[in-house]
Image (cartoon, rainbow, N blue to C red):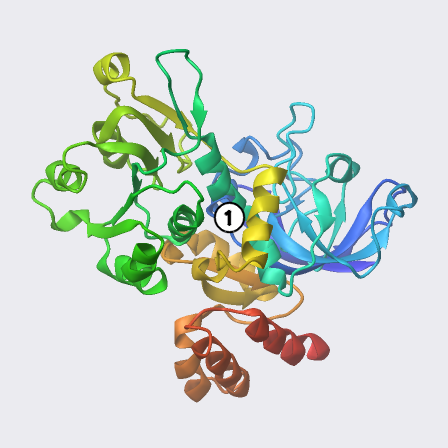
Amino acid sequence: MKNKAVRLYGKNDLRLEEFELPAIKDDEVLVKIISDSICMSTYKLLIQGQAHKRAPENLATHPVIIGHEFAGEIAQIGSKWRDQFEVGERFVQQPALNYHGSLASPGYSYEFCGGSSQYAIMPPEVMELGCLYRYDGDAYYESSLSEPFCCVVGGYNAMYHTNKQNYQHSQGVRPEGNLIILGGAGPMGFGAIEYALALKNRPKRVVVTDIDDARLARAEQLIPIAKARQAGVDLHYVNTSDLSDQYQYLMNLTDQHGYDDVFVYAPVKELAEMGDRLLAFDGCLNFFAGPSDPNWKSEINLYNCHYLSTHIMGSTGGNIDDQKESVQLFAEHKINPAVMISHICGLDSIPEVIPNLPKYSAGKILTYPAVNFPLSAINDFEYLSTTDTIYADLYQSLHQSCFEHQGLWNAEAEQILLDALVKDQ
C-alpha cells in the first residue's frame, strides 16, 4: 500500500516521501496514525544522524520513520495477534522497548515504524513486550501525550532517599519535602508541576525556575499558584535571571533547609551545578534533561556527597506502568496533558518543524499525520481566522473551542480539525 511519511536518511537529512509499505507479516500489526506529538529527542536524532545510539548503521539506504509519541487505530492484524486486538480500536504504544538489551525503538530505528507517517507497521517485539495496548479515551492527542508524560512519571518514580539505619532506599520524592524544577517552564516542566500536585504523597513546596518571563507567565496561567494551594502545595515561579544571588534566594524559600528533590530540566552546566548546591541532606538530584553532546560534563560537590548523603542520578523515558498511570490520571481528570501543547500542524509541516524545534521550547507541537496543515500556535487561532485565506473558518472554530477550554487544545478541537480536513485530503 502507498504511504506518506517523514523519513531520516542521515544527519540533517529529513524527507517527506510517498513509498510502498510492505504487507505485514503474521507477527506484525498495521496501525493508522492519527496524532503524534514531537519530542526534542527527535531533534537530537536529526542533528546526530547515524551517530545517534538508536539509529541503525544502514540509515542512508534504509531510512527510518521519525516520531515516537504517536497514537491512532489498529488497521490490520497479523494472525499471531488476532486474539489480542480488533481492527478499528484505538491504541497506546510505549516506544521504550529495551528488548534484549537493544536500543531499537519506534521513531528512531525502524524503516516502517514511526509516528510522522500515515501508517506504521508495529514489529513483533512491540507486542511481545506488551508495548501496544488498547486505549479507551476520547482523544487521540491524550494517547500521544501519555508517552512524554510517562517520562515525567518515570522521573519521579526513579527518585530515592536513603535510610542510614538499614540502608533501605525509599523510592519517589520525599513526602512533605521541598522540590525544585530547574528550567521547568517548558512543556515537560508543565507536566512535572501537574504531577507533583496530583501525587498522593506530594511535596509541601514546589519551586519552578526559568530565565524567560513569558514562559513563566504561561506556566502560572496554566497551573496557577491558587490551584497548588488547594492541593496543599506552596508553589513558586522564579525568574533566576532577575536575582543578584540566585542560590541564597532559592535557599531562603526553604528556610535554609535546601531541596530534598531537584530536577534539572535543561542541559545547562550552570543549572546542573546550582541543583547540586541546593541539595538538602539526603537530597536527590535527577538530571532529567538529555544533552546532545556525549562528552557533556558538569562538576558536583563530592564533599556533600560523602558527608550529606546527597546523590545524583538521571532518568530517561518511562515504562509501561508509568504510561498506564499517566493514562489513568488523564481519564480521572487529575491531569490535563493539554497544558503541554502550544502548536499543531499536519504531516506536510514536519520536515520544517523538526530542524527548528528549539525555537518552540515553551510548548509541545502536536502533529496530525493524516492531514496537511500549517504549523499554527493555539494562541494565534483568533488572529489567523481573520488573515488566513484558506483555513479562516477552521481557525475560527478551533479558536472558539479552545477559548471554551481555558485556551487549551481539547477533544472537541481535535475532532473539528479531523472532520474538516481528513475528508478532503
Specify whether residue 14 is in view. no
In this orientation, which residue lies closer to the viewer: 255 or 10?
255
The total of numbered circles placed on residues is 1
Q: Position of residue 95 (x, y in %)?
A: 63, 41
Q: Where 410 falls versus 154 (above or below)?
A: below
Residue at horizontal 27%, vertical 51%?
235
Q: Position of residue 80 (x, y in %)?
A: 90, 41
Residue at horizontal 34%, vertical 21%?
311
Question: Which quarter of the rendered picture does the C terminus lie within?
Answer: bottom right
In this orientation, which residue lies closer to the viewer: 376 or 85?
85
Question: Which quarter of the rendered picture does the N terminus lie within?
Answer: bottom right
Residue at horizontal 80%, vertical 52%?
30
Q: Please give the residue where the numbered disc 1 appears in the rendered image.
A: 149
Residue lying furthest right: 79
For label 1, the SS is helix
Q: Residues within 10 Å of mark 1 (few under 14, many from 20)?
A: many
Q: Position of residue 41 (x, y in %)?
A: 49, 43
Residue at horizontal 49%, vertical 41%?
153
Q: Which residue type does callout 1 highlight? A: Phe
In this orientation, which residue lies closer to the viewer: 412 or 380?
412
Q: Position of residue 126 (x, y in %)?
A: 73, 39
Q: Is residue 51 left or right of residue 295?
A: right
